[in-house]
Image (cartoon, helix red, strand yellow):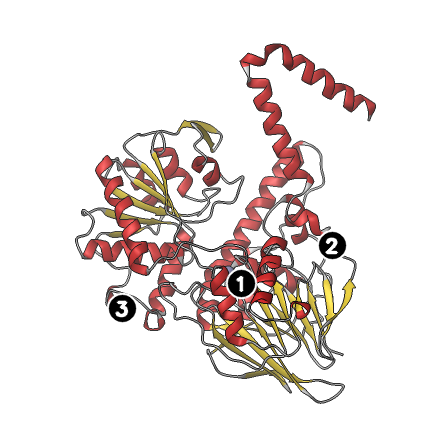
Amino acid sequence: MTTLSFYGAAGTVTGSCSLLETGAHRCLVDCGLFQGNKTVRALNDAPFPFEAKAPDFLLLTHAHTDHTGLVPKLMKQGFAGPIYATSATIDLLTFMLPDSGRIQESEAERSNRWRKRRNKPLIEPLYTEADAKAALERMVPVEYDEWIEPAPGFHARWGNAGHILGSASIEVKFQEKDNGNTMRLLFSGDLGPDEKVFHPEPGGEQGFDYIICESTYGDRERADYTLDGRREALRKELVAGLERGGNIVIPSFAVERSQELLHDIGVLLANGDIPKATVFLDSPLASKVTDVFIKHAAHLEDVEVPNAELFRDPNFRITRSVDDSKAINDIKGGAIIVSASGMADAGRVLHHLKNNIWRPECTVLFVGYQASGSLGSIIQSGKSDVRIHGKDFKVSAAIRTIGNYSAHADQSELIDWIMERAPVAGGLFLNHGDNDARAELRRLLGERGMDVGSILMPEFDESFDLTAGTPKSKGRTAPRIEQAALERDWYNDYAAFMLALGNAMEDDANEGKRKEILAALKDTLAKG
Ligand SMILES: [Zn+2]
């Protein structure tokens, strides 16, 4: 019997992890970190729902943390097989995984300081920098479009997914143990948009028994844009920002987004489309990742500067040391500062916001998705004060957003990708998307002639028997989380309630009400 289990990214977009068991082989595809609300993040500490030593090998679609961030934990718990990924993915992970290990260590340290003060038991980091480095030792590079045979009779091939450097969809084929038939599966990984700098569009193969496709933007269409249109939007913002006289701070993801921005800003500078400005890339991880892009420059598409000059514009300052970074604090105007993290919830960008956000001549420019609750989303929402590193700052800078940088295919691009690969003999699984996104994508695929009965929306920890025809659910084996909590947990409700309560208490027009509200709450608590 051939079984496929979804141990992450089912009804959510993080923690990607699928286990394929053929009877002869156990193949794990991705092993990602859970990100999101408290309940979802707690899954990182929970035991894997399968024995960590059970998979024979691990195949990675791309370097993003939500697809790779639990690999060191998997190894710590006994996984001993090889890890296959494209060489660009491994080069990115060489910096990203140890960085993630350091973050885990410092989060545990911070939590333990708090725990010591309250006499609570201390915790271990999820994994350390050393664990992450050990995982890198296990990685085996693969070439795009070339079959490998990780175990006798089991074949795998990586094809371009156009999402980030090194990203791939992974095709696997093997003979079914029971009947000797060859079965072919395709794991999409994360798919990139059509108009994406650096990467070509994915090619289309057909004849699959099963396709497992991401559905992040299954219910959303982006406004059409071209690479030139996107650069024009950036040009307008940079010209306006430099005219204001202050600095422009751009919170940016370290991987790919920072390099896209540097490339676009470099082209604008070279063409004289924006005034001369010093451009800082201030993020230790982004600097190292930029070197990986330079290494792989020959494979990048749409690059409009000679490879030898990529990211080496004389106006660029890529900071390497803390002192280089601190020196930026003295610059009061005319600098473009690209810095991580992209949602401004950690990293060096916080220093640049502290130095610039209260100055009306400065600009904060958002170029990526800001999750609700992140500092980025709070600044974007138009708050007049924000708290950074425990201090209050007035928001006087111009707060601007351009929304057309994206690493994900939108609704019609997902539909096109799937239709190019149809018909699918056994079934199409939609994962890596919330339920609304998946349901809408399924409905639209039905309109395009696909049989909706064979389009499945696997639940978290659900397994399917793939042996004959349309996959049959084997149910959820000891599910680790309620499906509904993936999108909203008690802590989200608690945070929203506390915010509303705080606002009610601060409302001077409501003087008489305050006591009433507190008395009613006290009453409820007393009733237990
Ligand atoms: Zn991704």
The answer to whether residue 328 is above or below residue 510 is below
Q: Nearer the viewer, mark 1 or mark 3?
A: 3
The answer to which of 278 and 385 lies nearer the viewer is 385
* Ligand 1 within 8 Å, label 3 CB: no
> Which residue in the protein does label 2 denote?
480
Q: Looking at the image, is 130 positioned above or below residue 160?
A: above
Residue 400 picture location, percent across and down: 36, 40
Circle 3 is placed at which residue position? 307
Marks 1 and 3, how far apart at CA: 30 Å
Q: Is mark 1 on a helix, strand or loop?
A: helix
Most foreground residue, 100 or 145: 145
Along the line of sight, which residue is nearer the eye, 124 or 528? 528
Quarter of the figure that contains the N terminus? bottom right
- For label 1, the residue is 133
The crowding category of the residue bearing disc 1, from other C-alpha atoms within 10 Å (few below 14, some 14 to 19, many at least 20), is: some
Three-letter amino acid code of the residue under disc 2 = Arg
Answer with left or right where residue 59 lies relative to residue 291.
Answer: right
Disc 3 is placed on an element classified as helix
